[in-house]
Amino acid sequence: MAASRLNLAIDTGSEVVVKRFRDLEPDPSWAFWHLTQAQTSYATHGYHRYPAKFIPQLTARLIEEYSQAGELVADPFMGSGTTLVEAKLLRRPSIGVDINPVAYWVTRAKVQAIEPERLRQAVEQLQNFLFGNTGVGFAGWTQPSLFGDWKSEIGDGGWHVPIPDRLTYWFPPQSLNALMQIQKAIDALDADAQIKVFFRCALSHCLKPLSWWSDRSVKPMRNLNKRIPDAYTVFFRHVKRMQRGNREFWRLLCERDALNVPAEPYCADARCLPVENHSVRLIVTSPPYVTSYEYADLHQLSALWFGTMTNLREFRTGFIGRSNGVTAAVDAPLGSAIAEQIVDALSERNPRKAKEVALYFAEMRQCFTEMQRVLRPKGVLCIVIGNTHLHGIEIQNAQVFAEQLQALGFELERVILREIPSKILPRTRDKATGRFAKTTKADYIAYPTEYIVVSRKR
Ligand SMILES: C[S@@+](CC[C@H](N)C(=O)[O-])C[C@H]1O[C@@H](n2cnc3c(N)ncnc32)[C@H](O)[C@@H]1O
């Protein structure tokens, strides 16, 4: 396979793509330097942390430029649902897909505004349950033996009994007991599924600070010296913040007559979208990166807590860009001569990494084939993606995607280079391994710029 790849010369199509990218200057109007953190986390955008979140204003601009009110917008790698929230605010129905169940639950919480007074009453009821005389109280529940009896089911399911030893590995007893009390009180609330999803999203956001999870590490590592704050304080502080966000979202949707605009998240694979052929006007998405974030690992606390993960190895399967467990040679076509060259160059230096990158490009091509199926003729696909380095080789994601898309029948309409002032990404990488590294150890900045690749279905 490597030999045949080496024989592949970059063809004329690839040259055109490479040239198109080579002379680009960053477009300052897409950097959004002026935005404060409060502005990028307005409405429900601040509900839950998520790696490599979109800046909502960037998504909104793409939606406004490439679709009309009422036209269907999709995000096949929706993450925390930024595209869906912005589409709703702009009166476009939307669907989103993510393989990560945590992304699904977070997005579900974010796309549905709750009437503020109804939410205020639910918060009050929850506080009464926990701190008043009438409810479950929190003094009596200390033993993890109760885990066995504990069931938490809402709406269309997905919340089950958590696994005690993994939880006791990550959480100190005082956090665990408080979290269990809060969870039990949420279950006992006389409220609809939407309100319970809201509180569970709040709880999920608080899991990291309340656990031994090391704040400084980009990998899941314990820091047993970490100072862990009081769980009730952390939880209700975040609930208050979310209430403010919900109020703003509710107000904006009312002003724009958009309360009932559908926004449907699914927990599914981007290679199999739950959408009819030729139905989507616009896709705005940012795919996972190869061997950078292990999304499955990063979200394991929430996935554990909500019982959507019983085995980390199985949980990782299906995540595109994974590095764990990639051993077999990749048979699926990469669909890009640039990709073939990158894989060849990498296999000289690290054959295992070369396999991971080949698999990544092959799987991304499968996703693009599926996006092509669901897009309407002349429908637009906007991909936000940065290039990266592995073992000193530039992994030209943007150029590869552009080439794959052209081969699948898309026209490369526009390429924007943007600087990333405040995207939530670790800022540094180790050049040899390509992994995120401590600032002191790293030898260059990761993703200082990224591309927006706009393609149109022919
Ligand atoms: C860069 S993030 C998207 C972030 C999103 N734009 C936001 O604003 O939060 C990429 C997402 O792709 C998801 N993903 C990875 N493999 C997938 C697959 N096979 N199908 C669907 N989603 C997948 C990851 O779980 C992750 O949430």
Image: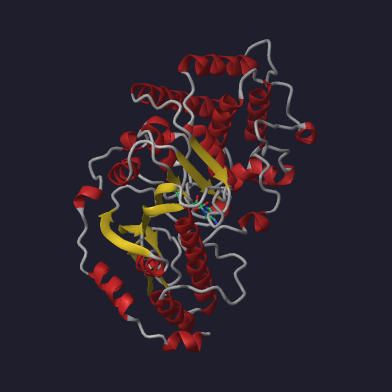
Q: Position of residue 351 (x, y in %)?
A: 52, 79
Q: Quadrant of residue 27?
A: bottom left
Q: Position of residue 330 (x, y in %)?
A: 56, 75
Instruction: Please indicate, yes or no, whether residue 209 appears anywhere in the rendered image.
Output: no
Instruction: Please indicate, yes or no, whether residue 341 appears anywhere in the rendered image.
Output: yes
The C terminus lies in which quarter of the figure? bottom left
Q: Residue furthest top?
A: 133
Q: Residue at x 46, y 56 (%)?
A: 371
Q: Residue at x 70, y 53 (%)?
A: 311
Q: Position of residue 211 (x, y in %)?
A: 58, 41
User: What colouring does the structure picture have?
Assistant: secondary structure
Q: Position of residue 85 (x, y in %)?
A: 42, 36
Whether residue 379 is situated above or below residue 256 in the rendered picture: below
Q: Quadrant of residue 192?
A: top right
Whether residue 110 is situated above or below residue 327 in the rendered picture: above
How many numbered callouts?
A: 0
In this image, 140 relative to 376: left or right? right
In this image, 313 relative to 209: left or right? right
In this image, 289 relative to 207: left or right? left
Whether residue 36 is situated above or below residue 14 in the rendered picture: above
410 and 232: which one is in front?
Answer: 410
